[in-house]
Image: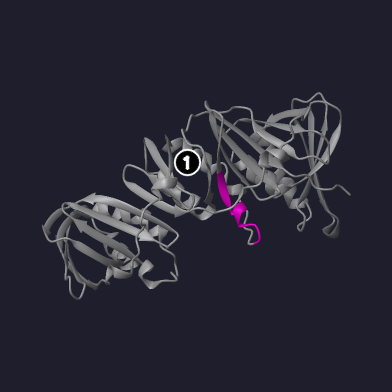
């Protein structure tokens, strides 16, 4: 094989693809990029066997087609300091030795036989569903839910983000049993069944979506999902199983509602957290007319703190406890200037809802309460 490619374009694509390569791959060949040349197109693939990313680049094919595995860190480290210039790759199809030539130098390294590099064979044609959505909307929805996924070996289904199609919309939900984040999109996805996207795959997908504009085509069967963007194709394995009935834990009649500045509330909780018990991270919310008091204490270290914020509230007085880290995560993943806190009593989950919502998107977050002593 012999081909010529832009150094800057290749490096840009390799930077995204390298995130899909494990630091210590179980199968050594998955520590390599797979280069496949066919005609005037180079396909670069990176994989950890469960999730893979491929990207296509236009090249000048000087001689031959074929496949070779190239060690990822070697190639990245060599070209990252190069200015924009054409790179010529001359690859021996028998011993997989590689010579890369730039305007000012020549580099030699060894590739590997790509026969052991197993590529995705495709979805089950008899069990495939598909829909399309904006890359920016998908990125936003994942960013606002991924933080709430679990890391649970006993219930692996909760280690991902659930895409659940409902009438005239799509719910994107994550929960670890202590907190929940639900994004509802007012779209007509055109699909019937849903899937659960693993947290690791979701974080990798965020890196791809950040480089994209326009729509993403999402195709899936009962085991795999394919995310097709303009420059990248990502394939990942689903988490199989039945996702918990998340709507059953969301209170429907939370009649105590307070509206407060999100940034002020977030800053206050971060300060009070310093004074709260380091094991439980318990903080207390004390609501009274147009007032929200935030309290924390650690009896073992004789520390305590409290702050009072002005809010919009005209309900009965109420005290409720939350784990500070959960509330900080939720508030940090909102864009709204103000947040609506919906409560029922001190034993029911608290709902945190952005007051300012984006058009076509509805967000609701939930934190389970903690027992007050």
Picture quadrant where residue 174 is located: top right
Picture quadrant where residue 52 is located: bottom left
Query: Which type of secondary structure does the marked residue at label 1 adopt?
Result: helix
Q: Position of residue 176 (x, y in %)?
A: 66, 50
* Residue found at x 66% / y 43%: 180
What is the span of residues highlighted in magenta in the rendered image?
154-162
Q: Which residue, given by chain and number where applicable, does mark 1 sit on? A: 139
* Residue found at x 48% / y 53%: 223
Camera-side residue: 274 or 191? 191
Q: Position of residue 153 (x, y in %)?
A: 63, 62
Left or right of 340 in this view: 303: right
Left or right of 320 in this view: 201: left
Q: Position of residue 18 (x, y in %)?
A: 37, 59
Q: Position of residue 49 (x, y in %)?
A: 42, 63
Number of residue marks: 1
69 w.r.t. 262: above or below: below
Scheme of colours in the image: one colour
Q: Is residue 283 magenta?
A: no
Q: Residue furthest front?
A: 126
* Residue found at x 62% / y 57%: 151
Picture quadrant where residue 217 is located: top left
Camera-side residue: 121 or 127? 127
Quarter containing the N terminus: bottom left
Q: Residue furthest bottom?
A: 95
Camera-side residue: 299 or 373? 373
104 w.r.t. 227: above or below: below
């Amino acid at each position: 094989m012999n081909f010529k490619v832009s150094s800057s374009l290749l490096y840009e694509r390799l930077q995204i693809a390298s995130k899909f390569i494990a630091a210590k791959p179980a199968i050594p060949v998955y520590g390599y990029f797979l280069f496949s040349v066919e005609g005037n197109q180079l396909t670069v693939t990176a994989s950890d066997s469960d999730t893979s990313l491929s990207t296509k680049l236009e090249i000048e094919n000087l001689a031959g087609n074929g496949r070779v595995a190239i060690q990822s860190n070697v190639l990245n480290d060599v070209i990252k300091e190069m200015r924009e210039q054409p790179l010529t790759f001359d690859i021996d199809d028998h011993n997989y030795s590689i010579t890369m030539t730039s305007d000012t130098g020549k580099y030699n390294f060894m590739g590997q036989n790509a026969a052991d590099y197993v590529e995705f064979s495709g979805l089950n044609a008899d069990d495939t569903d598909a829909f399309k959505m904006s890359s920016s909307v998908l990125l936003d929805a994942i960013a606002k839910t991924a933080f709430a996924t679990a890391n649970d070996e006993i219930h692996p289904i909760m280690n991902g983000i659930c895409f659940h199609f409902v009438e005239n919309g799509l719910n994107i939900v994550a929960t670890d049993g202590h907190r929940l984040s639900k994004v509802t999109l007012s779209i007509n996805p055109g699909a019937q069944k849903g899937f659960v996207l693993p947290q690791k795959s979701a974080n990798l997908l965020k890196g791809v979506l950040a480089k994209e504009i326009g729509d993403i085509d999402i195709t899936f069967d009962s085991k795999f999902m394919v995310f097709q963007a303009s420059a990248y194709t990502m394939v990942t394995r689903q988490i199989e199983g039945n996702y918990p009935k998340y709507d059953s834990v969301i209170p429907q009649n939370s009649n105590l509602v307070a509206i407060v500045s999100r940034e002020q509330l977030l800053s206050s909780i971060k300060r009070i957290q310093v004074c709260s018990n380091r094991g439980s991270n318990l903080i207390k919310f004390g609501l009274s007319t147009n007032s929200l008091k935030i309290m924390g204490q650690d009896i073992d270290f004789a520390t305590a703190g409290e702050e009072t914020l002005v809010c919009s509230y005209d309900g009965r007085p109420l005290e409720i406890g939350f784990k500070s880290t959960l509330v900080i995560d939720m508030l940090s993943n909102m864009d709204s200037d103000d947040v609506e806190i919906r409560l029922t009593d001190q034993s029911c989950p608290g709902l945190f809802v952005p007051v300012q919502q984006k058009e076509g998107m509805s967000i609701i977050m939930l934190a389970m309460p903690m027992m007050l002593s």
